[in-house]
Image (spheres, helix red, strand yellow):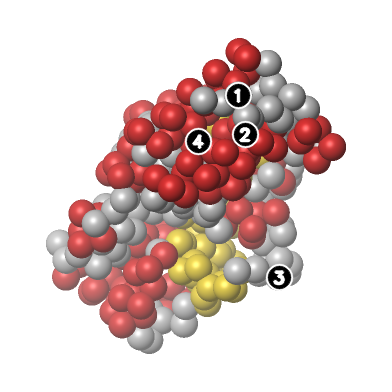
Amino acid sequence: MTIELATIVDFIRYGASRFGAAGLTFGHSYDNALDESTHLVLHALHLPHDLAPAYGQARLTAAEKRAVITLIDRRVDEHKPVAYLTGEAWFAGLKFKSDMRALVPRSPIAELIQAGFSPWLDERHVERALDLCTGSGCIGIAMAAHSPDWQVDLADISDDALALARENVEFQDVGERVRVICSDLFASLAGERYDLIVSNPPYVTEQEFVALPPEYGHEPALGLRAGDDGLDFALRILAAAPDHMGDDGVLIVEVGESERALVELLPQVPFNWIEFNVGQMGVFLLDRRDLVEHADAIRAVAKARG
């Protein structure tokens, strides 16, 4: 079947064509079939993700062809995200271990991390940061890797996710500056204060969740579902965050498509919606003083849902 295919480029093209013909859904680290196929093929061949284009014409051995085709077949048959098939994902320029214990790393917050959170933190001093709802640990670990002077805590309620996060802390060799904590949002963080809190909590609505493509069925529902409007966790974070922030602290939270619902619930809160290279992505920033000023309204909305 693969006798016509010979080179790395041949198999990348073949994989992309198979993925497109199968109607697969993309969005787990990559948004298109060609990039997914490239990741999968290079992984199967034990080659770096930034392989020079000149090697694209290198020919595969029979054993290498079988290894690549096996992964392509699994991606088509199982609809499993490529990151879970290869056991790795790239985030903020770093490689992370990825498996079904946590969501595949894919937040636009990676762009902020690589830019040093500029211009938002240009005039602020950060010593301690928190990655709340850390999952695989990718956001917090990337913050530590890109900002060597920061001490970073990773918090999550899932034991499985935290086990993966610990593996990634070791993998990235940031254990001296990164602490992993089991916590239901801020519940186990009494007395802790941070200059920066970043969170990518669950924000998928119940209606959206039941309509998700099969790829998302391989991910833990705990990391996705967030009530009828997708704001069950974001509102709790908004209500509790001021007690865990320094006076000049900053809160950054991703809410995705639930942005509109959040603005409708709290029209008086001056959310700063961050623009990324690809546009607005449902990520807001708030200073502690804004959270304190509107604390009564935020707590009332959060309390109303029980």
* Picture residue at 52% right of the left edge, 25% below the top: 1
Pointer 1 residue: 3
**Residue to which mark 2 is pinned:** 11
From this view, report whether residue 225 is shown above or below residue 172: below
The mark nearer the N terminus, 4 or 1, is 1
**Above or below, 211 relative to 57:** below
Q: Earlier in the sequence, mark 3 or mark 1?
A: 1
**Disc 3 on helix, strand or loop?**
loop
Q: Earlier in the sequence, mark 2 or mark 3?
A: 2
Task: Measure the alpha-carbon separation of dots 1 and 2.
Answer: 11 Å
Q: Secondary structure at mark 2?
A: helix
What's the amino acid at mark 4?
Ala
> In the picture shown, does residue 86 fall above or below 215?
above
Q: Quick one: 257 or 47, which is closer to the camera?
A: 47
Q: Closer to the N terminus: mark 4 or mark 3?
A: 4
Q: Is residue 102 left or right of residue 91?
A: left
Query: For mark 4, what is the residue?
Result: 83
Quadrant (top left/top right/bottom left/bottom right) for the C terminus: bottom left
Find residue 25 and report its horizontal and vertical position in percent.
41, 50
Q: Are marks 4 and 3 in contact (CB under 8 Å)?
A: no
Q: Residue at x 66, y 23 (%)?
A: 45
Disc 3/disc 1 C-alpha distance (Å) = 53 Å
x, y percent for residue 165: 49, 32
**Mark closer to the chain start, 2 or 4:** 2
Residues tagged 2 and 3 counted as in contact (Cβ below 8 A):
no
Camera-near label (4 vs 1) is 1
Looking at the rendered structure, the secondary structure element under dot 4 is helix
* C-alpha span from label 4 to label 1: 28 Å
